[in-house]
Structures are given as structure tokens and as C-alpha cells.
Amino acid sequence: MSDANALAISLFGEILMSEQLARSRLSRVLPKGMELSHFSVLNHLAPAGAERSPAQLAKTFHVTRGAMTNTLNKLELAGYIHIRPDWDDARRKIVGISPAGRRARDEALAGIAPLITDIVDEIGEERVRAALPILRELRVRLNTPD
């Protein structure tokens, strides 16, 4: 194995393990019954007036429409989102966050913030800032169609 291959494998190994550990730690501090996918959707819809179609949300989160429908059904059942018809195209639906969803998202953020702030403090703000451009570029390259 070449040094370049070993470097690439080490990089992706660290990213994948970090992602798994982050999901595990974040899931433990979310409000009871909330999953990380639920928080992610609520956080995406949280900016004032943000509404998306289920298809747009599925594309944003790189999941199937079926998986997004499942998440949206759970969020709607909890009262965290409203799903309404698209006024321009009655065949489509539009998803928006409800006041209860905004409160749930804020509660989740209150649980997550100390955890991620502590980690950034331990690593050091400067080192985190230095890593962000590399991680962003990696995300952009991975998001480019094959």
C-alpha cells in the first residue's frame, strides 16, 4: 500500500469513527424521544419562515424520500412540524416548524451546546478554525456527483 493510500485510509477512518462517536454522544443529550435525525430537520427548518418540501429535505440530508417521510411523520405526530399543501402545486406538500418544534429544537440545542463547546475548548479554537476549511472542502468534493 502506498503512503498516499495509507494517508487516505487513515483520514477516512478518523472521520468515520469521529462521526460515529459524535452521533452517540449527541444522541445521549437530546430530549427524551428525539432522535438526531429529528433534531437535524428541526434545526434546518428553524430559521424564520423556512419551509421545504419533503423531497427538498430528503435531498438536503442525502436520504431516500421514504426515510424522510418516516422522520417527518414522527415529527408531525409529536407536533413539531406542520405539513400543508403547496399552494402552487396541490400534488406537493410543504413542511414548516411549529412553535412546539422550535421549543424542542431550542431544548436540544441547550443539551448539545455544552458538549460541543467543551470539545472545541479542549482542542483549541485556533486548531478547530484551521481544520474547518479542510473539512468543508472534503464535504464539497464528496458531494460532487460521480
Image (cartoon, rainbow, N blue to C red):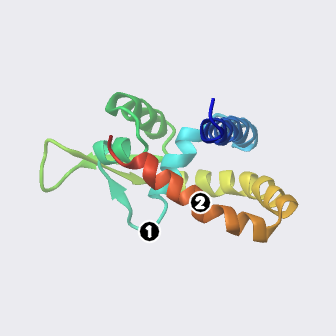
Task: Name the residue at 63% across, 63% down.
Answer: 132
Within-10-Å neighbours for mark 1: few <14, some 14–19, many 20+:
few
Near-viewer residue (118 or 133): 133
Give the secondary structure at mark 2: helix
Up the image or down, 129 lies above or below 13; here it is below
* Picture quadrant where residue 25 is located: top right
Q: Disc 1 residue type?
A: Ala
State the residue position of label 2.
134
Residue 145 image offset from top left, x and y in percent: 32, 44
* Picture quadrant where residue 70 is located: top left
Comparing marks 1 and 2, which lies closer to the viewer?
Answer: 2
Task: Name the residue at 60% across, 51% down.
Answer: 104
Task: Name the residue at 36% across, 49% down.
Answer: 144
In the picture, measured across the screen, residue 99 lies left or right of residue 111, that is left
User: What numbered label is drawn on residue 114?
Assistant: none
User: What numbered label is drawn on residue 48?
Assistant: 1
The answer to which of marks 1 and 2 sits earlier in the sequence is: 1
Res 98 visible: no
Q: Residue furthest front?
A: 2
